[in-house]
Image (spheres, rainbow, N blue to C red):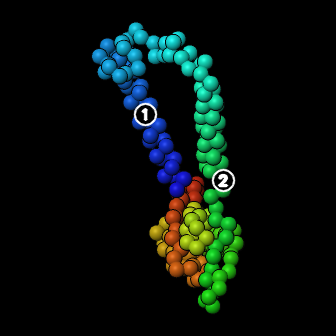
């Protein structure tokens, strides 16, 4: 949800800035503005002294300004903390089969999956992160394969062995995975 909110906010802000900036540039270059526009021509200021000081003496003006700014600060702090909070899944809900459920620590499942994957043929290192909801976890996996290994084979072994074993042992209906495969760098071999 946060990704969607970020995209919508960035899109709306960009559209507003592009529209306002383009309109001000067009008027500044000599285009005739509509009658409702903020300024009349290329030599007009955006906010005159009268417009800037118009509401200063009203009793409602400063509380509204300060309330609006406080609301903006609170929204900015919410956005910042939502973006900085940890995205890892803390626990996974497991159906025990007897109508009850149990909780499995997310880090335990990550560690077991990473260890089993690192022991696969052709894989030199694996890093696993659980994301999603606790009743529908997802995995993000980074595999580093050895120079002699086929990335396709390493991926197939991961899906059929490690991921399937983790899904079955946690009694999950599905365990979707986003896998990123990188080849390990190595020096060129000398031919004599």
Q: Is residue 118 at all visible to an observer of this figure?
A: no
Residue 61 drawn at (x, y percent): 59, 26
Q: Choose top left, top right, bottom left or bottom right for residue 60.
A: top right
The answer to whether residue 122 is above or below residue 60 is below
Q: Residues within 10 Å of mark 2 (few under 14, many from 20)?
A: few
Q: Which mark is residue 85?
A: 2
Dot placed on the residue nearer the N-terminal end, 1 or 2:
1
Residue toward you, 155 or 136: 136
Identify the residue shown where x is 63% and y is 80%: 94
Is residue 59 in view?
yes
Residues under numbered marks 1 and 2 in contact, where contact means CB atoms less than 8 Å apart? no
Q: Residue furthest bottom?
A: 98
Q: Which residue corresponds to mark 1?
A: 16
Percent x, y of residue 16: 43, 33
Q: Secondary structure at mark 1?
A: helix
Does residue 110 appear left or right of residue 149 in this picture? right
Within-10-Å neighbours for mark 1: few <14, some 14–19, many 20+: few
């Amino acid at each position: 949800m946060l990704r969607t909110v970020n995209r919508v906010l960035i899109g709306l802000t960009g559209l507003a800035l592009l529209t306002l900036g383009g309109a001000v540039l067009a008027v500044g270059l000599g285009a005739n503005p509509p009658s409702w526009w903020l300024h009349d021509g290329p030599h007009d200021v955006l906010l005159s002294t009268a417009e800037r000081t118009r509401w200063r003496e009203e009793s409602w003006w400063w509380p509204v300004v300060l309330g609006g700014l406080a609301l903006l600060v609170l929204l900015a702090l919410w956005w910042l903390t939502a973006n900085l909070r940890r995205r890892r899944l803390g626990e996974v809900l497991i159906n025990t089969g007897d109508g009850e459920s149990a909780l499995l620590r997310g880090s335990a499942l990550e560690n077991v999956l990473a260890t089993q994957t690192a022991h696969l043929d052709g894989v030199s290192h694996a890093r696993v992160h659980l994301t999603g909801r606790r009743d529908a976890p997802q995995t993000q996996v980074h595999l580093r394969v050895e120079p002699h290994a086929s990335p396709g084979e390493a991926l197939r072994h991961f899906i059929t062995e490690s991921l399937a074993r983790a899904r079955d042992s946690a009694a999950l209906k599905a365990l979707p995975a986003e896998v990123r495969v990188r080849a390990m760098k190595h020096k060129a071999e000398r031919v004599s």
